[in-house]
Image: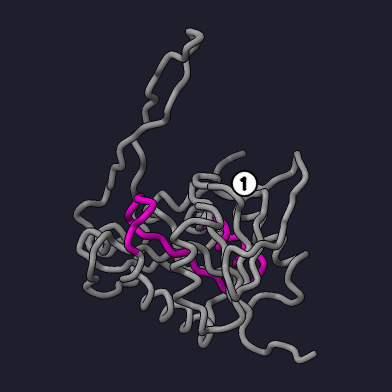
Amino acid sequence: MQTDTRPLILVTNDDGITAPGIRALVDAIKDLGQVVIIAPDSPQSGMGHAITISKPLRVERNDVFKGFESYQCSGTPVDCVKLGHHQVLDRLPDLVVSGINHGSNASINIIYSGTMSAAVEAAVEGIPAVGFSLCDYAYHADFEPCKPFVKSICQNILEKGLPDGVLLNVNFPKADVYKGLKVCRQARAKWKEDFDQRIDPNGRKYYWLVGKFINMEMEAADTDQAALDAGYVSVVPTQFDLTSHSSIDLVRDWKM
């Protein structure tokens, strides 16, 4: 049996294996290597870096993607990467690609994102990775303008690699045509959150999380949010090392 020598690309997401975004992603990179899809069997948005530890994990072959090896997983996006790496694939992937997410993962959104956490997990394992997101939450959003950029970025990663522990967070503005691409930094922003309190038919309270996105660097021109607002694709090199290296000496000087 002849071994496939093409680059092995693992594809996942957090919107679920039937989401239009992951179909667009597979279509964009299908010529770059051997594409294998392992994605959640249901939406997992906002799961962050959650993993399944209190119940069994299941991964099953399916025919959602004709012509490709694809699996649905009962767990989170991070579970998909872990199972792919340790159980499903016969070798280490050359690239993990996550998305295309329905909605922005720019700025602070990366912390909550299952899409980006899947890419982070790959980077933890030493696998080059990238997460793609479109700033349009609509189920039938138009992903066509994203595809040339997705293919180009993935091709560059396969050919040139990424530094150890670094992944890319790529966001597309909601537009028919993009002005170009900007490599930038993550904007300092947060969600001003609130809870919409309601009453169920049994008279019990329940809540929906609501909020407003607050960009605390509106005047900064070098952030991902500024690039998106100006109609550019934002690319942020990201790392999972959360150490504040500039603060080490400060805390070390405390009398503890």
Quadrant of the rendered structure where residue 148 is?
Answer: bottom left
Residue occupying the point 60% across, 53% down: 40
Q: Is residue 58 left or right of residue 43?
A: right
Would you say residue 243 is visible in this rendering?
A: no
| Residue 35 x/y as whole percent | 59, 76
**Magenta segment includes 128:** yes
Residue occupying the point 66% across, 62% down: 62
Quadrant in which the N terminus is drawn: bottom right
| Residue 109 x/y as whole percent | 42, 49
Q: Is residue 186 left or right of residue 124?
A: left
Residue occupying the point 70% across, 45% down: 52
Quadrant of the rendered structure where residue 82 is?
Answer: bottom right
For residue 248, above or below residue 202 = below
Q: Which residue is mark 1?
A: 50
Dot 1: element: loop
Label 1: few (<14), some (14–19) or many (≥20) C-alpha neighbours in 10 Å: some
- Label 1 amino acid? Ala
| Residue 95 x/y as whole percent | 58, 75
For residue 165, above or below residue 60 = below
- Most foreground residue, 64 or 108: 64
Part of the protein shown in magenta:
116-142
**Magenta segment includes 13:** no
Colour scheme employed for the rendering of this structure: one colour
For residue 67, above or below residue 81 = below
Would you say residue 43 is visible in this rendering?
A: yes
| Residue 18 x/y as whole percent | 52, 56
Quadrant in which the C terminus is drawn: top right
Residue at the top extreme of this rendering: 203
Count every numbered label the image shows and give the total: 1
- Most foreground residue, 29 or 118: 29
Residue occupying the point 47% across, 69% down: 25
